[in-house]
Image: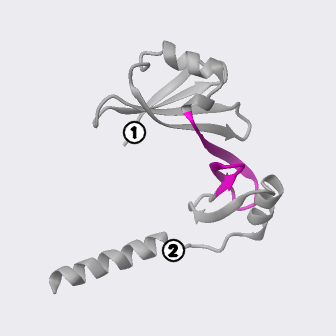
Amino acid sequence: MKFKLTLLLILLISGFAQAQIRKIPAAVTEAFKARYPHAEKVAWKDEITSFEAQFTLNGFAMTADFNSKGEWQNSEKKIKFTDLPAAVNDGFKKSRYADWETTNVVEIDKNSESLQYRIEVKKSAVQKKYLFFDTNGRLIRDAITI
């Protein structure tokens, strides 16, 4: 009985955590439709300081963030490692992480910044990093993943 109550409580809490906190403003949805008119399977998340759309565009899984005024902030597109630009692929191969296993690759387009690529790599179950490259294949920074 105690187990059933605990399980029920966990399910209720997780349901509330995933519930939409605020209604998505019309300015946000209109800006999204204008920027991504062919987006499919759109789902919204309230990120407190912004609104995130998760969607599919031309076969790619994507996210896009907008502020409450509908101003686009950034987008991320999940791509395959083989789809990286040659300069980024070369930069990765020349980095000290070249022998690490790649797990995820994302193209990041930020408002007022140049395009970046984030490559998630791991050497073991404990050693995992995000590598950020510019379009010229220069490693900008690395960050530990959780």
Residue 133 in which image quadrant: top right
Tell me if residue 69 is in the magenta stretch.
yes
Residue shown at the point (16%, 83%) measured from the top left: 2
Which quadrant would the N terminus be assigned to in this image?
A: bottom left
Residue 136 or residue 93, whichever sits in front: 93
Looking at the image, residue 56 lies above or below residue 145: below
Dot 1 falls on a residue whose secondary structure is loop
In x, y percent, where is residue 36?
78, 54
Residue 28 in which image quadrant: bottom right
In x, y percent, where is residue 60?
65, 47
Residue shown at the point (60%, 22%) measured from the top left: 88
| Circle 1/circle 2 CB separation < 8 Å | no
- The image's mark for residue 76 is none
Tell me if residue 143 is in the magenta stretch.
no
Question: Which secondary structure dominates the residues rendered in magenta?
Answer: strand
Looking at the image, residue 84 lies above or below residue 112: above
The answer for how far apart the CA atoms under marks 1 and 2 are is 26 Å
Sequence-first disc among 1 and 2: 2
Amino acid of disc 1: Thr
Looking at the image, residue 55 lies above or below residue 145: below
Q: Which residues are magenta?
A: 55-80
Q: Residue furthest right?
A: 34
- The image's mark for residue 19 is 2
Residue shown at the point (57%, 38%) measured from the top left: 106
Which quadrant would the C terminus be assigned to in this image?
A: top left
Dot 2 falls on a residue whose secondary structure is loop
Residue highlighted by disc 1: 145
Crowding near the residue tagged with mark 2, few <14, some 14–19, many ≥20 C-alpha atoms within 10 Å:
few
Looking at the image, residue 51 lies above or below residue 145: below
Residue shown at the point (64%, 18%) measured from the top left: 87
